Image (cartoon, helix red, strand yellow):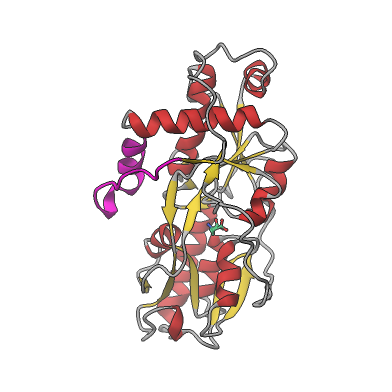
Amino acid sequence: MTRPTRARAALTAAVLCAVAALAGCTADTPPHAAPAAKATTAAPSAHAPADTSCQPRRSLRPSGGLPQPGHMPAGSYMAQIQKKGRLVLGTSQDTLLFSSRNPFTGAVEGFDVDMGHQIAEAIFGDPDKLTIKVIPNEKRVDDAADGTVDLVAYTMTINCARWKRVNFSTVYYDAGQKVLVSTSSAAKGIGDLGGKRVCAPNGSTSLDNIAKAPSKPVAVGRASFGDCLVAFQQNEVDAISTDDTILAGLAAQDPYAHVVGDKFTQEPYGLAMSQQHPEFTRFVNAVLERNRANGTWKRTYDRWLGRFGPAPQPPAAEYRD
Ligand code: GLU
């Protein structure tokens, strides 16, 4: 699996630059940017039973129609956001296609960021009344739960363990976990990676899924996807395993890497919010419902993921009332 050293060194330098640019390590790095990645190796328990105490795809049903933008109901959390003047979105800055910093414009952009713009538009009538706060992968649940941010859009899988601490919207994207390996590797999927070091971000479902894989790979945690890619290029890990969407973005940055095998998990993405304001979850779901019906979801898909083929049907909304 080892690549030619010189090519690897040059590539590593190039990718470190690219990741640095993507990670916004520039003069305009916001003060709240995630701290420099620390190399950590996590060993999640392979025996933790899956939490099946809920039906994770079911969220709170919208109550009536959407209010006019700029006229949020008195006393609602939406009215508080309107008064504040900005919607605060917690997201990543190194997840290509979903939420990454455009090195030319400095803007953080992607499918997830557009979800934030769409909610801002519904509140203010202006999609740009959005403050993007870059948060570490590991802080997604905490920052949504305690209101550090109003909304988290971060390739975040809806599951029962997380529902215990945050509210999720209905599903806005259906992903699934795959594997990225070197083009010189014979591995065809997670089943071929027994005993191999496989990287995923700390705090992700991906890391747990690696640890639980019957083939018994060695799960290696890093702070971010960019850190996994660098570890892969420095031969500190043999593979990366996370959502197919994210791996597509990583493979696009490394000509010596490719994505193999079928999806071996289901990773339905939801927007996460505090449980203190259920009316905001209902409002977000009303916006998602309208945007599935009026073609906005499809346009968002085509914009960011259209290179992978025609847009599928948007995930159907399911409610728990
Ligand atoms: N979707 C998975 C999760 O929420 C893995 C990708 C990620 O960490 O963003 O944990």
Q: Position of 126 compared to 277: left or right?
A: left
Q: Is residue 204 above or below residue 280?
A: below
Closer-to-camera residue (274/111): 274
Q: Is residue 44 above or below residue 302?
A: below
The image quadrant of residue 246 is bottom left
Visible in this render: residue 36? yes
Q: Quadrant of the N terminus?
A: bottom left
Q: Name the outermost residue toward the left.
A: 310
Q: Name the outermost residue toward the right.
A: 146
Q: Position of 150 compared to 235: left or right?
A: right
Closer-to-camera residue (116/73): 73
Q: How many marks?
A: 0
Q: Position of residue 140 (x, y in %)?
A: 65, 49
Q: Position of 178 compared to 81: left or right?
A: left
Q: Position of residue 20 (x, y in %)?
A: 54, 55
Residue 221 part of the magenta-drawn span? no
Residue at 65 percent across and 52 percent down: it is 162
Visible in this render: residue 5? no
Q: Quadrant of the C terminus?
A: top right
Residue 305 part of the magenta-drawn span? yes
Residue at 69 percent across and 38 percent down: it is 274
Q: Position of residue 8 (x, y in %)?
A: 44, 77
Closer-to-camera residue (46/9): 46
Name the quarter showing ligand 1. bottom right
The image quadrant of residue 291 is top left
Q: Which residues are magenta?
A: 296-317
Q: Is residue 179 above or below residue 72?
A: below
Residue at 40 percent across and 84 percent down: it is 4
